[in-house]
């Protein structure tokens, strides 16, 4: 974990430790005041206790200090703001990496989630780096709602502002990097000046990230002949073993859904086992042996030919397990040096993209659990990630997996009420939250869950009913859409429970939504707006009390 990541992880905890330490010191001083004067030098003892208190608290205040360089001042006109809008944590990670790289320059920095940034701060700022994702059908991440609204309000021109935008997206979606472009248009309309052209990043494209690094090096006066030190590589996969796979919905009218249990290979470092409820498992899928054999035959290649790429000396067949198999290919100068030509060509094949799944367990369980729906494409083939996990990977085989922190869906630190809303395999992320809350003794929880048929699609039925009976779940509302003539969904349950929802929110409840973006998430958002009012719902989002992990 980097220094900036540690700093940000500790923010908010230092006050708790400080209060605890101060309470202990006060108790000790009270005890000293009751002792006879001849038994102890009370002034000396008090001074020693205060010094001990300072030594105890210093690390926590140090870790939680504002992100700033030796430039000293945090005056807005002299500060470079790094503002990120993230739905699943990736933009936040890139923002922290950018901040870490810029700490070596003589600059004052502020790293902020976009929910902490608004028009008033933008009006005072002079330089802002935006790192923003796009979600859904070209929408801004949920955390950006307050900022987008404030930017749309009338105000003074932003003609003193210089900005840069790193727009994250996936070209497979129609509205590629839409929020980044929408943000740029809004800033230009208000006379802000682009520092350099918007940079699009397709699924973490290293070339685009290198361009971001180069542009920042040139604009921020990186020392001559040097560039900013940024390591954009994703965390390496760890080796996990698929221990168990069980079908949860036999006989269902919907696609098969599987519960998977994975454990780390014995010699893997312990740090890779740590995660929180709300975090995401990224899976490195593989081509199946049948797919590779078919492709090798189609192109008349010997799969056993040895190839060394970097430190990996494997057969061609082994290299192709993790790489995209192109429909067409052409070797360069095959007659001259066929082995070198094949090596050069294979090394340029992109790696298979990862697939992300909400984790359905907590680290204290000692195993990582997933709830995965098997996806079948229009041509009848299984989806890349779901096919690998639910069909092709045998129990006992190794799964390449890494954990991605998703702070936007982490649980509240306190015991405030929690309203959990989801459908289908979205129950995975909500289940992890319930496990964590049960372990913490926080029992003011309300789950609203929807699926097709209660008989076939009531995932984790025994566990949910046991939580309800024991009081971990104060309220459990279920919506099985096909069990009656007129379909009923979780958003309909919300509207039926409008008074209870208002009461829970008035008591400080946070609302967490996990599941399908199409249909469920939009319907739930509309129902919540109807019950609470659109302005109040937006306010809850700005406060971190309305969070979504939708896909």
Image (cartoon, rainbow, N blue to C red):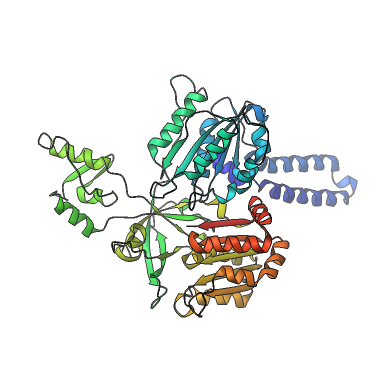
Apparent side of residue 504 relative to residue 352 in the rendered image (left or right): right
Q: Position of residue 70 (x, y in %)?
A: 62, 27
Tell whether 544 sits left or right of 451.
right
Q: Is residue 424 visible?
A: yes
Q: Nearer the viewer, residue 287 or 242?
A: 287
For this orientation, the residue located farthest to the right is 37
Q: Nearer the viewer, residue 216 or 10?
A: 216
Residue at 51%, 48% (x, y): give it. 89
Tell me: 240 left or right of 22: left
Above-or-below relation of 178 to 262: above
**225 above or below 49?**
above
Tell me where residue 527 appears, x and y as whole percent: 61, 64
Residue 107 occupies quadrant: top right
Q: Locate residue 294 relative to residue 211 in the image: left or right.
A: left
Q: Which residue corresponds to the image point at 53% horizontal and 44% vertical from the top-left? A: 92
Q: Residue at x 62, y 76 (%)?
A: 470
Q: Residue furthest left?
A: 335
For residue 117, say whether it is visible. Answer: no
- Image location of residue 168, percent across then percent down: 46, 43
Total label count?
A: 0
């Amino acid at each position: 974990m980097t220094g900036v990541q540690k700093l940000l992880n500790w923010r908010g905890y230092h006050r708790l430790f400080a209060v605890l330490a101060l309470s202990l010191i006060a108790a000790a001083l009270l005890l000293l005041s009751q002792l006879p004067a001849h038994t102890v030098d009370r002034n000396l003892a008090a001074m020693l206790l205060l010094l001990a208190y300072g030594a105890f608290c210093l690390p926590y205040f140090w870790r939680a200090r504002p992100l700033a360089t030796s430039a000293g001042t945090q005056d807005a006109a002299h500060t470079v703001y790094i503002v990120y809008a993230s739905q699943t944590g990736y933009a936040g990670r890139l923002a922290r990496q950018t901040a870490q790289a810029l700490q070596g320059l003589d600059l004052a920095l502020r790293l902020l989630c976009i929910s902490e940034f608004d028009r008033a701060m933008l009006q005072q700022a002079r330089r802002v780096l935006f790192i923003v994702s796009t979600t859904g059908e070209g929408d801004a991440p949920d955390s950006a709602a307050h900022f987008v609204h404030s930017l749309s309000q009338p105000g003074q021109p932003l003609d003193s502002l210089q900005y840069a935008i790193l727009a994250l997206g996936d070209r497979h979606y129609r509205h590629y990097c839409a929020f980044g472009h929408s943000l740029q248009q809004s800033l230009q309309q208000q006379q802000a000046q682009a520092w350099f052209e918007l940079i699009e990043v397709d699924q973490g494209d290293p070339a685009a990230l290198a361009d971001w690094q180069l542009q920042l090096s040139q604009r921020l006066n990186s020392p001559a002949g040097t560039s900013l030190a940024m390591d954009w590589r994703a965390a390496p996969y760890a080796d996990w073993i698929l221990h168990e796979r069980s079908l949860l919905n036999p006989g269902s009218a919907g696609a098969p859904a599987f519960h998977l249990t994975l454990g780390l290979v014995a010699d893997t470092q312990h740090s890779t086992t740590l995660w929180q409820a709300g975090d995401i498992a990224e899976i490195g899928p593989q081509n199946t042996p049948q797919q590779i054999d078919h492709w090798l035959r189609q192109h008349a290649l010997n799969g056993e030919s040895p190839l060394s790429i970097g430190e990996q000396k494997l057969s061609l067949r082994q290299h192709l397990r993790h790489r995209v198999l192109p429909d067409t290919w052409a070797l360069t100068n095959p007659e001259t040096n066929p082995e070198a030509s094949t090596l050069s060509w294979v090394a340029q094949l992109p790696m298979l993209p990862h697939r992300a799944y909400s984790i359905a367990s907590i680290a204290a369980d000692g195993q990582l659990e997933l709830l995965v729906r098997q996806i079948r494409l229009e041509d009848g083939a299984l989806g890349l990630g779901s096919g690998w996990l639910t069909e092709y990977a045998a129990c006992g085989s190794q799964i390449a997996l890494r954990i991605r922190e998703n702070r936007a869906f982490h649980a509240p630190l306190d015991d405030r009420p929690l309203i959990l809303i989801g459908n289908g395999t979205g129950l995975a992320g909500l289940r992890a939250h319930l496990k964590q809350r049960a372990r913490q003794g926080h029992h003011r929880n309300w789950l609203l869950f929807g699926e097709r048929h209660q008989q076939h699609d009531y995932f984790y039925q025994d566990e949910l009913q046991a939580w309800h009976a024991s009081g971990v779940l104060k309220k459990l509302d279920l919506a099985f859409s096909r069990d009656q003539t007129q379909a009923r969904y979780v958003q309909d349950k919300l509207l039926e429970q409008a008074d209870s929802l208002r009461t829970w929110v008035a008591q400080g409840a946070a609302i967490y939504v996990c599941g399908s973006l199409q249909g469920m998430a939009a319907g739930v958002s509309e129902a919540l707006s109807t019950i609470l009012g659109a302005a109040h719902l937006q306010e809850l989002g700005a406060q971190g009390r309305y969070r979504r992990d939708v896909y």
